[in-house]
Amino acid sequence: MHSCKYVFVTGGVASSLGKGIISASLGKLLQSRGLQVTIQKLDPYINIDPGTMNPYEHGECFVTEDGAETDLDLGHYERFLNVYTSQANNVTTGKIYQTVIDRERKGDYLGKTVQVIPHITDEIKRRIKLLGEDGKYDIIITEIGGTVGDIESLPYIEAVRQLKYELGSGNSVVIHLTLLPHLKTSGELKTKPTQNSVKTLLESGVQPDILACRTELPINEDIKNKIALYCNVESEAVIEAIDAETIYDVPVLMKKEQLDVVVLKKLKISGYNETDLSKWEEFLYKFKNPTSNTRIGIVGKYVELKDAYKSIAESIIHAGVKNETKVELTWIHSEDLEDMPQEEMEKLLGDLNGVLVAPGFGSRGIEGKLRAIKFVREKNIPFLGICLGMQCAVIEFARNVLGFENANSTEFNPSTRYPVIDFMEGQNEDIHKGGTMRLGSYTCKIQEGTKVRSIYDKETITERHRHRYEFNNEYIQAYEKAGMIASGINPDKTLVEIVELTSHPWFVGVQFHPEYKSTVMNPHPLFVKFVNAALTVKRETVKSPTIV
Ligand code: GLN
């Protein structure tokens, strides 16, 4: 039987040290040696998934092919490994309890008292092992959210302790990510918080095998030896995780620190290739040595929190590298645009080479998005509208070109006379399980002779969705006559998935989320061509005198 080995990644000292990036980087290194790897995230919160959480709380909600609404770390895993994740890759306390309580109601526990130990911990272990059972992977990296010592993490740490014991020696390793604070006054890196964090882990019966230490400064041998001695790990297993310029540097830094070598040694795995990051390094080189630059504005309502648009920002990086250009992002708050004087808005947007209107829910900032779209449409500035951004492009066109006064989405005005974006009857029948939204991967057919057809260079594509509302097909003829065409259609439901303007150099709105599918090795064509349009579209047609 194919036996799969496990790497558990826990965090200590502080949150936000970058367990997700360390996990993804280790995954990348192991994958480059020819191992089949996947990464799983265990989140100790009680929400079933982050789908209902405000982006201010949790950053972006990442969506998988099979329609799971997940933690944004899964986005990093996919972007680094270039491999899809699924429902099974994100487990929450909410899901664990829901399963256990459902089972209890069905009488599956045969009259027993249902308890955290063993029932909750058993369910956690079952979920961890699930990914390993299909025989596809050599190594599963399981990242445990939160910080060791948190009350809500305890059942997870206990599950790790039991699994470590059950799997036996050489079949699992625990990597603990900690922080070495730098005291400027004494010029020292302090190891005590790391020692204490390891002690906390030891109280739960888990001895970490590897310590990855986040640090501002390089860690010398003395510090490594000291940490090794006080934390019972080998000195070579104390890994320096120094602050990096970009997240894309981390695999290279981890290779230098031989994180993968130590992991494979502890897992008693041999016979695989040498680590090969040559393609990754090529990407990194181009990223750091652009030959041109361009400016793109992102209009959204959560722009203060960059994590809310993580996948979009990363997709633009991938596309920038592909075009060998540095993309400078200007984050524009859609609410600020609502009552900005016209001249100021024209200056702000007119200075950009492209504008992207972001996804979102609810009416806040909509009018600002519509204003931005009117401007870029009229001034021939490249535009990409994603999900709500596409819906706004449709609304703006209705109001300002078709003359449909106060046209709207029924999400924002249920009694509008022109519901150009609407909740379509019957659309919910075959949505993937999970909620009331159209979630996950759907097919789209692209019409010949359109701009997007040349962008994708194929007729049938699949893209991921996360929305409730749709283009209202009743209006399709009016739009097409006036120059906004439905260039991509869902063949099963005849839902409009892509709109574009025939008389604009680059104006595309997509009902789906291309940002979920862009990876370092596979930058998404829509983003690549959007950035290219930003670089190349001549703006002679821009008439505003305020624009230089
Ligand atoms: N709020 C819109 C809808 O539900 C768009 C969602 C989105 O942008 N992800 O259809």
Image (spheres, grey):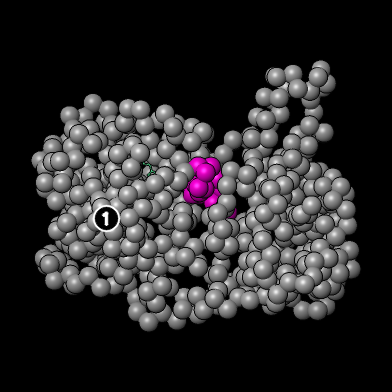
Is 330 situated left or right of 15 in this image?
A: left
Is 97 situated left or right of 270 in this image?
A: left
Q: Which residues are magenta?
A: 56-73
Q: Nearer the viewer, residue 376 or 536?
A: 536
Instruction: Name the residue carrying label 1.
Output: 508
Question: Picture quarter containing residue 48?
Answer: top right
* Residue at x 46% of width, y 54% of height: 516
Q: Is the residue indicated by label 1 positioned so its CB lies within 8 Å of ligand 1?
A: no
* Residue at x 86% of width, y 47% of height: 166
Q: How many marks?
A: 1
* In magenta stretch: residue 60: yes
Name the secondary structure under disc 1: strand
Relative to 235, does residue 354 appear above or below in the rendering?
above
Ligand 1 location (quadrant): top left
* Residue at x 36% of width, y 31% of height: 427
Relative to 483, does residue 181 appear above or below in the rendering?
below
Residue 298 percent across, percent down from the top left: 34, 57
Q: Nearer the viewer, residue 67 or 247?
A: 67
Residue 184 percent across, percent down from the top left: 67, 72
User: Is residue 34 visible to the viewer in this orientation of the structure?
Assistant: yes
